[in-house]
Amino acid sequence: MLTKKDLEQIQKMMSNSLGDFFDKIIVPYFDVKFKENDEDHDDIFRKLDQNRNEHDRMFIKLDSIEKKVDGHEKRVKTLEKTLQTS
């Protein structure tokens, strides 16, 4: 039959074993997973930043094109008015 001292030793051994299991298995597993997730998130955010920068450049180009088109439209209207009055 187990005595109270035996039960205390078993409890202590179980506690130590669970602590070792946690420290040696669980913590390293999550450290690796968190590191992988951080790297994945860094890649995603880097790509998002690149896309944002690319879109900003595209909008700048579109604004430039729009200004040129507006200038051409004004010239065309001026020519049309000139041709109509002639």
Image: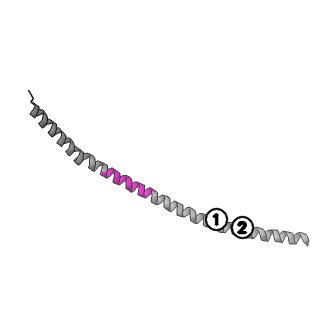
In this rendered view, identify the residue nearer to me: 84 or 24.
Answer: 24
Residue type for callout 2: Val
Residue 10 x %, y %: 13, 36
Residue ID for mark 2 = 69
In this rendered view, identify the residue nearer to me: 82 or 35.
Answer: 35
Is residue 37 found left or right of 75 in the rendered image?
Answer: left
Residue 57 painted magenta: no
Q: Which mark is residue 8?
A: none
Tell me the CA gap for discs 2 and 1: 10 Å
Q: Which residues are magenta?
A: 31-44
Q: Which secondary structure class fits the magenta region best? A: helix
Residue ID for mark 1 = 62
Quadrant of the frame with the N terminus: top left
Residue 81 x %, y %: 86, 69
Residue 42 painted magenta: yes
Residue 17 x %, y %: 18, 42
Q: Residue at x 69, y 68 (%)?
A: 67
